[in-house]
Amino acid sequence: MLRFIHLSDSHISTPDFANYGHRSAPNLEAVVSAINALPFEVDFVLHTGDVVQNGAPEEYALARALLAPLRFPIRYVNGNHDASDLLQRELAGVQTPSARYDYTFSAKGVQIAVFDSANRRDHTGNLTDSQLDALRRLCTPEGAPLILVLHHPPLPLDTPWIDQGWQVPDRPPFGTMLLENWRAFQAAIAPARRRLRGVFFGHIHHAHQAWRDGVLYCAAPSTFGQLASRPEQSAPQPTPEQPAAFYVVSVNEAQVTVRQVSLPRPTSQPI
């Protein structure tokens, strides 16, 4: 049995940084405490990006201090708010950062492949031609059970502001939140659908699950604050009443089980 924690979008900045009706640092501190208090073991913690708010060195220093007490190893994905080189050096311990933070690792007989979709500091993601080639080589019909990980949603999610973008008066349009070449992603992974145990991502600040062509897609809620994602919604809307949360994901030969764990709001939070 493989079991891991999936969390995302912590947006650490200053200790007092607040948005969405929440403060990001106390929320992440509470999440770490909740994970450490779990009455069972997990194999690793997976953070699917936007660890910090502005990609600044001091933000990574604070994030590192907040995450240091975790009693399980943590793996990182580069998000559009992150600075890839700093994330790799300061959090992942990579001495020579790469332009795209792609990597694979194995746990309990499952292969986990991480692809860096955050090519620029805006909302839309992208995989390069070389990344798509690597994805095709990875996604063969035969092989070990496989989990794919990235920051951006690689399929539409039935919410206009996520799928199509949105407009704010007197500002340029915000692009889609999706992986720009999501159709190419879908085609690349299709041969491996029988061994794919799931595609995990973040970015949208809301718990989302979808099933497409026999594959599970799963977006983690934010440890910071959630955004509503209703079918008629043309722009993001904070939902400050919804607390920080994370997933516990269990994978065995027969099924994948995803549990959401939500935390009480810290009493120091603004409303």
Image: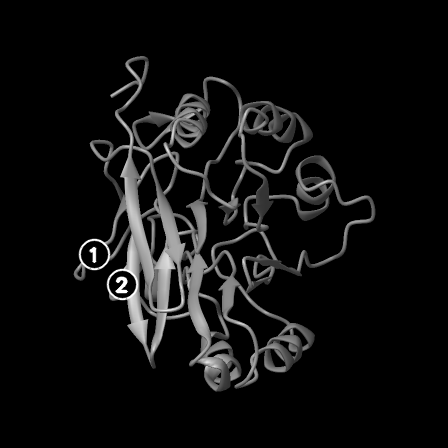
Amino acid type of disc 2? Answer: Pro
What quarter of the picture does the N terminus occupy?
bottom left
Horizontal and vertical percent position of residue 207: 30, 50
Question: Residue 130: x and y, percent?
Answer: 69, 76
Q: Is residue 225 visible?
A: yes
Residue displayed at 62% across by 38% down: 55
Residue 208 got which mark?
none
Task: Name, please, the residue furthest toward the right.
Answer: 96
Residue 47: x, y in percent?
51, 45
Which residue is drawn at the image coordinates 61% and 77% (left, top)?
138
Would residue 50 be found to the left or right of residue 157 on screen?
Answer: right
* Mark 1, residue position: 233
Rendered view: 228 above or below 161: above
Q: Is residue 164 visible?
A: no
Image point 50% across, 76% down: which residue?
A: 185
The amino acid at mark 1 is Gln
Crowdedness of circle 2 by 10 Å Cα count: few (<14), some, many (20+)?
Answer: many
94, above or below 150, in the image? above
Mark pair 2, 1: CA separation: 6 Å
Res. 160 mark: 2
Residue projecting furthest to the top: 268
Task: Compare residues 188 and 110 and report the one nearer the observer.
Answer: 110
Labelled pair 2, 1 in contact (Cβ < 8 Å): yes
